[in-house]
Amino acid sequence: MTDQLVNKFENAKAIFQAGLQAVAPGPAIKNLCSVTDETLTVDGLHYDLRQFDKIFVLGAGKAGASMAKAIEDILGERISAGIITVKYGHLEELQKIRIQEAGHPVPDQNGFEGAQAVYKLAKSADESTLIICLLSGGGSALIPLPVNGVTLEDKQETTKIMLACGATIHEINAIRKHLSAIKGGGLARAAFPATLITLILSDVVGDDLDSIASGPSVPDSMTYNDCKTIITKYSLEDKIPSSVLKHIEEGAAGNVPETPKADQNFFTKTQNVIVGSNFNALLKAKEKADELGYNTLLLSSMIEGETRDIAANHMAIAREIMLTGYPLSQPACVLSGGETTVRIQGTGKGGRNQEFVLAAALKMSDIKDVVVLSAGTDGSDGPTDAAGAIADETTLQRARSAGLDSQNYLDNNDSYHFFDKLGDLYKTGPTNTNVMDLRIILVG
C-alpha cells in the first residue's frame, strides 16, 4: 500500500471520529438541558422542580449509560430512582441510576427483566412525578415486554426472522410495537398522569419519533393492518410464530386494542426532544473533511435500500468524480448516512457496513486512488465486534494474493472473515452513542 493510500486510510478514520464526537450523548444533552436555581430547562421549555416530589430516570438504548451520566451531572441528588437497559458492555459509572445489561439485536431474559423494571417504575409515578426517559438506538430490542399471549421466545424468533428477511427498521419496529406493552406509546400510557420528558438520540432515517426505540413515549402511526401488510410483503405467514400471527390478525379484526394514537390524553404531558442525529454527525464529518483539504459532498443522511445496490451507486459517483470531475473535483470526499439492509442468503458472518465495503471493493476495478470506509456509529456492525471495514484499490489484489475469492465471500454474506484475513476490519469498541451509519469515500 502506498504512503498516499495509508494517509487516506488515516484521513477516513479521522473524518469518522469527528462525526462520532458530534453525537457524543453527554455534550448533546448538556447543550439542550440545564438547571438554574430550581428550574429545569429542556430545549427552551421550563419546569419548576419544586412542583415535583419525585424525579425518575428510565430508558433503553446503546447510548443509555452515557445519556444517564449526563442527566446525573445535571440533576444530581434530585433523582429519586432510575433504571436503564443497555447493550452488554455499553457502561458508565453511575450513582443514582441502575444499569441493566441486556441482549441486542435479539432480546433476551435480561432485557425482559429490565423492561419489567422500567414499566413498574413508570406505573408507580403520579401527578407530582417528573420522569426523564432516555432513548437511543437499540432500545427496541433492549426493553422487550410482550403482550399477553406472546412469549419472550416468540419475540426473539420474530426478531431474528425480521432481521434476516431484509425488512427496514421501520417495518421491524411496526411489528415490535404491536407485540409490546411498552413500545408504541405504551410507556406514556403507563406513566400518565406524571410529566414525561423524553430525550432521544436518533438512529432512524428521517428521525421519525415513533420509530426510534419503537416510540415508547409517542403516538404510534402504524396499525395492525400495516403489520399484516409487512408480513405478506416478506411472505412470513408460515415463518413467524403462530402466537404472533394470531395476535396481529386479532388486532386487525378489531378484537385487540390498537397501540396508543395521537388523540389520547396521556400525550398532553409529554415533551420529546431529539438531542442528536445522523445529520449532526455528517455535518461535523464534513467540517473535518473540509479541514483536511477535500472538496466534500454530503450526499444524504437518509440512505436506505439493499446494501449492495447502495454500494454500487456510491461507487458510480466515485467513478464520475474520477473520470469527469463531477459533481465535484478531486481530491473529493463523499459522505452519506442512514441505514441499509442486507438480505441474508449465505451462512457467513458480517454486517451491513462490512458488506457495503466489500460490495464497493468489487466495483473498484477501473477506479484508482479511492478509499471507502463504512461503519456503525455504535461501534458494532451486525453480530460482530467490528464497527465496519475499510477498503481501497488494492483490496481485491491483496485478497487474490491471500487466496480469497472476494465474490464468494460476498455471496456468502461473509464480509467479516474476508476483512479479518486482510486486517481491514475497523474496530472502535463500544462508542456509547448510536445514530446509524457513516459512509466515507475519498477520491483522488
Image: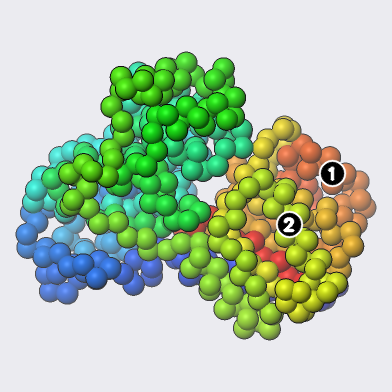
Secondary structure type for disc 1: helix
Mark 1 is surrounded, within 10 Å at the Cα level, by few (under 14), some (14 to 19) or many (20 or more) other residues, namely few
> The C terminus appears in which quarter of the rendering?
bottom right
Q: Is residue 378 left or right of residue 211?
A: right
Residue 396, image x and y in percent?
87, 55
Q: Is residue 4 above or below residue 183?
A: below
- Residue toward you, 254 or 42: 254
Residue 192, image x and y in percent?
16, 43
Instruction: Give the Cα distance between marks 2 and 1.
Output: 18 Å
Q: Is residue 72 above or below residue 291?
A: above
Mark 2 is surrounded, within 10 Å at the Cα level, by few (under 14), some (14 to 19) or many (20 or more) other residues, namely some
- Residue toward you, 56 or 366: 366
Q: Quadrant of residue 30?
A: bottom left
Q: Mark 1: which amino acid?
A: Gln
- Residue toward you, 194 or 96: 194
Residue 13, image x and y in percent?
65, 68
* Residue 179 numbered tag: none
Q: Earlier in the sequence, mark 2 or mark 1?
A: 2
Q: Kindly identify the residue that appears in the image at 45 percent across and 30 percent down.
A: 227
> The N terminus appears in which quarter of the rendering?
bottom right
* Residue 313 numbered tag: 2
Q: Mark 2: which amino acid?
A: Asn
Label 1 sits on residue: 407
Q: Kindly identify the residue that appears in the image at 55 percent across and 26 percent down.
A: 232
Label 2 or label 1, whichever lies nearer to me, is: 2
Secondary structure type for disc 2: helix
Residue 44, image x and y in percent?
24, 70
